[in-house]
Image (spheres, rainbow, N blue to C red):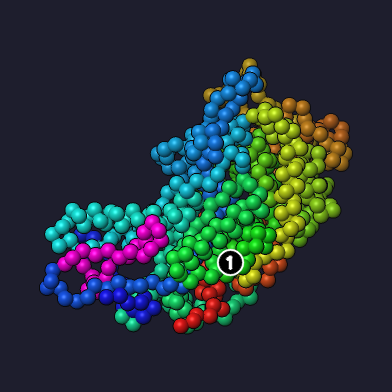
Amino acid sequence: MTTNENGAAASAPTGEDEWDAPQERVATRYVDAQGHTIYAWNLTSSKLTDPVKLYMPSHRIVPIVFVPGIMGSNLKALKDIYRSGQDGKASSRKKIATKGQRIWNVDSMTSPVRADNSISWPGQDAAARQLMLNMDAVEVDDRGSIELRSEESNVYLPDEGRTRSAQRRREEIRQARLDDKRRRGWGTVSWCSYGAFLNWLEEQLAGATYRNGKPSLAFLELFKHVGSSPTGAIHAPPPLTEEQIKKLVKFRFPVHAVGYNWLKSNLDSGQYLADKIAAIRKHYTDLGMDCQKVIVITHSMGGLVARAASQACSADKDILAVIHGVMPTDGAGAFYKRFVGGLTGEGAGVFGSLVGKVTALVLGASGRETTPVLGFGPGPMELAPNQLYNGGKPWLFIKDAHGKTLLSLPERGNPYEEIYRSNPWWQAVNPAWLNPAGLAIDALQRHRRLLDKAESYHKQLAQKFHQPTYAYWGNDAADHKAWGTVTWRAVVANVYDPKPGDVFFGDAMPTRAWSERPGLPIVGHPAQWRWSPGHDDLPANEGLPERYLLDGKGQTLRCTIQPAADAGDGTVPAGQSGAGVMRGSPAVACRTVGYDHQMSYNNDSVRAFVFDSVVRAIEPIVVKA
């Protein structure tokens, strides 16, 4: 017999050989390759006369579309990638990647066993990074890792003496469930970053069911949210009611993920997302289901992509609500630091975990290594502080050893002209590092053209947000400081750089050593300082970028970016950028603590916020009988 889940008892366990058969006989349900709901059961003894129930899910569909942050999408080679020989002749070209080869797959890079057909990054130089992490040479790869929840893996089918065939059928159902998740895009995003959250979200929203007129056990768990409001809410909304949560049973919430080419502009990725959302809606309507709009959940730069989709690519009509997580609304000072000195030494945030350390190894530990990638990627460039960052006030400071401010930038509110396109030593990109592969291009001109595109994105979307928007961001000043402002500390110093042939004592070659002389005054305005010849590529000092300069008198200056000191999540600063979403008058906005940027969706209070937001987002939907 069939019955609707909108009026159904406690969910039956879906066990296997080691599980007991459920008291209520419920057919196993899954989705086939065409998206149809399929039920599985084996014939049983005629002595069993109670009905086998087929619980029918709702025909009303509200897809959840998850959009990851920068570097959270898997990428593969769009074509064969070649590197020219040192003589520059085409005949000496060497293939360094084959079409379809995995170029960027965080799960593979963090696994002890490298996935088949993936690039081995250790030992790759800046030229290889430029060629392989090129927005025009890669595309989204859907072959990433996916894991089933335990209850999805444990498929109950009665054996009735046909153990082998039943086991084979169970394996087929498991594979069908994996295939369904892959069709919904789960393989396009980093599993180690987002997999646990995607499975949790699907489990929570699928649990809103009735069995025999009573809430399922999973549904009863959801009622713990009754009477609650999100942690850290700036203007706390009314607590959730039982009736609001009960409305979940009227819908089905299939969870989709949309990875994208994060090297491209967020405007390009926004169009890609808009097209995917339209295709998702069409898929369900073609199956005869009622699918009017989707709910978009974003992480980090995915928020910029979603805003572009909604506000620049006409997807707003297809979106019920957007839930933003740790969005760098106006950029992040950390990205200036990464352009200048690579991706090491950040402690918390994206690069504080194992995932982060491996990611930093691939993208580069120094400015010379990261510049050919970030410098030709409008997506990453759109994460550098924009014209509204820090309320339009200066955020880049040059100070002497005593803390006296020598220069504050941007002075005129335009970081693109005063910091990113400017020629002084503090510019984010060193032009000499842009083109290590020696491509026949005007590297600086191309970089500036792509920078123009990044500036255009922020001018177009600075004040635009989907309505309604829900958002949370980190405000942790204790354990997850971020670069809200960035400070160069300058001091007159003598430097010793060991050279081959130097005589030294001990077991190891000594490293660079400084003798600072803070008592000596620095001569000349910072704009007059110039690079010290031969010292434009320095290893970071304990992860903090350094530059050797000469002041107006020719004295050697040691200039070092100071550690992050502002409240945030280790990557996005709260006041300077995270709170920028308040310009969009979000329905609910939360400042919270206790998590790093990359793994924020694994935090309990964040997950409670997501559930709360979904419940509030569907409240305006009028459900017709």
The residue at 62%/56% (across/down) is 270
Q: Judge the density around disc 1: few (<14), some (14-19), many (≥20) Cα neighbours within 10 Å.
A: some
The residue at 62%/71% (across/down) is 468
In the picture, the quarter occupied by the N terminus is bottom left
- Number of marks in the rendered image: 1
Disc 1: which residue: 318
The residue at 24%/72% (across/down) is 52
Furthest residue in direction top, as rendered: 501
Query: Which sits in the foreground, 624 or 575?
Result: 624
Residue 220 position in % (x across, y down): 38, 77
Residue 557 position in % (x across, y down): 77, 35
Quarter-of-image position of residue 195: bottom left
Query: In the image, is residue 417 above or below residue 604?
Result: above
The magenta span reads 21-44
Residue 516, visible in the rendered structure: no
Quarter-of-image position of residue 368: top right
Query: Which sits in the foreground, 61 or 405?
Result: 61
Residue 399 position in % (x across, y down): 78, 46
Query: In the image, is residue 205 above or below residue 334?
Result: below
Residue 385 position in % (x across, y down): 72, 52
The residue at 73%/60% (across/down) is 462
Residue 442, visible in the rendered structure: yes
Under mark 1, the amino acid is Asp
Query: In the image, is residue 354 above or below residue 183?
Result: above
Q: Secondary structure at mark 1?
A: helix
Query: Which sits in the foreground, 522 or 431?
Result: 431
Q: Main secondary structure of the magenta part?
A: loop
Query: Which sits in the foreground, 180 or 400?
Result: 180
Q: Is residue 380 magenta?
A: no
Q: Is residue 31 magenta?
A: yes
Query: In the image, is residue 86 above or below residue 36?
Result: above
Is 154 displayed left or right of 404 in the figure?
A: left
